[in-house]
């Protein structure tokens, strides 16, 4: 059988891979996209961003119905039909993944459903989901194989031990659940289970939730999660876990020293790159000591015809970073002079309230000894926040005091994840605080808090009195 020949082959159909393949086709390259799933989508659409956001929406509806009591509207106690919630969430995933599959067809991207393995620097062999193998020759390949959940050695395979994938399956709601790791996944999925009625405890080995994020943003979230979570244990590590008849007995060490039994444990201690097991060693591409594929600023590996993007090349492991890298790599392949050099990659944790930031954080400025001015607008002074009963928020700008350029933006509050895009644009466009201040924002909106934070920098915020800067 003669092999199929493509100008571009993308291995891995997540948001990095399919964005790359679609642009490849748009730029006129004969393109194939390989993934084991029936449609493109990857972890993000099938087992990550999208299903978790669907479940977080359920959590939000439950919270809002409860909060309505303070506004004079009472609902009865919610009846949660776990099977129906799961079916709705699966419907969302199906609609999106089959839609993306259709878009691949419209663009004439050949979608190959199967597991691809490099045979050499220009050949992939695909074990087809339908049986048999298909050999594909290519001029250029983009590796977009993503990542998988990291594990801890003492948590053995058990129906009581969940990772992000099995937690999103939502088979039932346990009475008690321990979340190991107070990062993105732990807080998002912990919030979902808490709102569905589980008593959730979180154990985090560092001194606070979401290490890396600015503490003033996290403390707003902490105030709320300490109400919805049973217990938050920081500076504490899990050192042992054993299955008993009634649950998993987990032993802690550090600030908390005890052993406690939980119905279920969600392990969310980070993710590992998928950089082995598919023949990469048959090419000149190399992998660093942390398992990430090494690439240059154009996302080219040490094998000139092979590029790599997304989680498999390093942090931050975020879908939007992968899509952007994917498009950059394909533009390079198509002969454009471009590189992956964003000024800001936004991070969003979709808890309630959401936390979002971009560019330089205050923490990084301190660590790197960078002189910055920080202008904060507390949501208690926002009319819109008051009218939706969500004054638990803060918007801050990290500003270079000399050039007055906005170097970073941090937001905690309802809808912070949508609002941060304005911050990313400000950082990318090298906006000054004056640019943000002089941009008329619609009233009454939460986005005004960004404009007013810029006004705070000049001591001119309408709703916050601050003595003028000298
Ligand atoms: P994470 O890196 O966000 O958090 C892991 C946490 O576990 C850290 O706070 C770490 O200190 C802690 N930890 C590690 N080992 C521990 C131990 N033995 N005991 C107690 N705590 C321990 O990782 P995650 O939450 O698993 O998410 C993985 C990645 O997935 C994230 O880095 C992110 O890139 C991505 N993700 C993004 C989103 C989003 O964009 N909203 C959502 C989910 C996941």
Image (tube, rainbow, N blue to C red):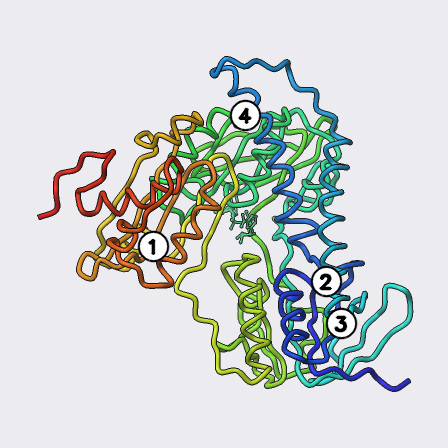
Give the foreground label among 3 and 1: 3
Label located before the other in sequence (3 or 1): 3
Mark 2 — residue?
103
Instruction: Say whether mark 1 is within 8 Å of ligand 1.
Output: no
Mark 3 — residue?
108
Q: Position of residue 229 (x, y in %)?
A: 52, 28
Image check: 205 left or right of 174? left
- How crowded pointer 3 is (Cα within 10 Å; few <14, some 14-19, many 20+) is rated as some
Which is more toward the observer, 360 or 94? 94
- Residue at 44% across / 42% down in the picture? 416
- How crowded pointer 4 is (Cα within 10 Å; few <14, some 14-19, many 20+) is rated as few
Disc 1 is placed on an element classified as: strand
Which is more toward the observer, 462 or 221? 462
Give the foreground label among 4 and 2: 2
Q: Position of residue 267 (x, y in %)?
A: 61, 43
Q: Position of residue 141 (x, y in %)?
A: 66, 78
Which corner quadrant of the image does residue 382 belong to? Answer: top left
- Per the model, the C-alpha gap separating discs 4 and 1 is 31 Å
- Residue at 67% across / 65% down in the picture? 18
Which corner quadrant of the image does residue 36 belong to? Answer: bottom right
- Residue at 65% across / 75% down in the picture? 24
């Amino acid at each position: 059988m003669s092999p199929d020949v493509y100008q571009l082959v993308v291995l891995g159909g997540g948001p990095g891979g399919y964005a790359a393949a679609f642009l490849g086709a748009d730029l006129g390259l004969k393109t194939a996209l390989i993934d084991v799933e029936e449609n493109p989508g990857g972890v993000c659409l099938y087992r990550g961003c999208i299903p978790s956001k669907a479940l977080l929406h359920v959590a939000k509806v439950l919270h809002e119905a409860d909060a309505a009591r303070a506004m004079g509207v009472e609902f009865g106690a919610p009846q949660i039909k776990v099977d129906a919630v799961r079916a709705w969430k699966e419907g969302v995933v199906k609609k999106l993944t089959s839609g993306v599959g259709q878009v691949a067809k419209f663009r004439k991207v050949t979608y190959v459903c199967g597991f691809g393995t490099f045979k050499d620097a220009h050949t992939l062999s695909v074990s087809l989901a339908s049986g048999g193998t298909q050999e594909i020759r290519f001029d250029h390949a983009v590796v977009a194989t993503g990542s998988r959940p990291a594990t801890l050695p003492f948590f053995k395979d058990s129906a009581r031990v969940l990772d992000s994938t099995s937690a999103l399956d939502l088979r039932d709601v346990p009475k008690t659940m321990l979340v190991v790791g107070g990062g993105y996944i732990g807080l998002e999925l912990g919030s979902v289970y808490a709102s569905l009625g589980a008593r959730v405890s979180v154990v985090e080995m560092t001194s606070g939730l979401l290490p890396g994020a600015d503490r003033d943003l996290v403390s707003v979230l902490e105030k709320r999660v300490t109400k919805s979570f049973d217990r938050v244990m920081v500076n504490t590590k899990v050192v042992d876990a054993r299955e008993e008849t009634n649950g998993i007995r987990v032993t802690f060490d550090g600030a908390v020293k005890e052993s406690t039994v939980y119905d279920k444990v969600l392990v969310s201690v980070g993710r590992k790159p998928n950089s082995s097991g598919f023949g990469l060693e048959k090419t000149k591409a190399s992998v660093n000591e942390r398992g990430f594929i090494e690439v240059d600023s154009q996302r080219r590996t040490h094998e000139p015809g092979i590029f790599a993007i997304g989680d498999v090349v390093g942090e931050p492991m975020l879908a939007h970073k992968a899509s952007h890298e994917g498009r950059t790599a394909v533009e390079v392949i198509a002969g454009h002079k471009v590189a992956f050099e964003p000024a800001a990659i936004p991070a969003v944790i979709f808890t309630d309230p959401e936390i979002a930031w971009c560019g330089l954080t205050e923490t990084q400025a301190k660590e790197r000894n960078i002189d910055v001015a920080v202008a904060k607008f507390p949501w208690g002074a926002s009319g819109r926040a008051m009218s939706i009963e969500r004054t638990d928020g803060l918007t801050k700008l990290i500003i270079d005091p000399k050039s007055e350029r906005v170097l970073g933006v941090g937001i905690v509050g309802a809808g912070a994840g949508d609002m941060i895009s304005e911050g990313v644009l400000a950082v990318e466009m090298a906006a000054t605080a004056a640019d943000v201040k002089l941009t008329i924002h619609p009233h009454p909106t939460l986005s005004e808090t960004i404009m007013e934070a810029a006004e705070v920098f000049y001591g001119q915020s309408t709703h916050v009195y601050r003595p003028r800067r000298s």
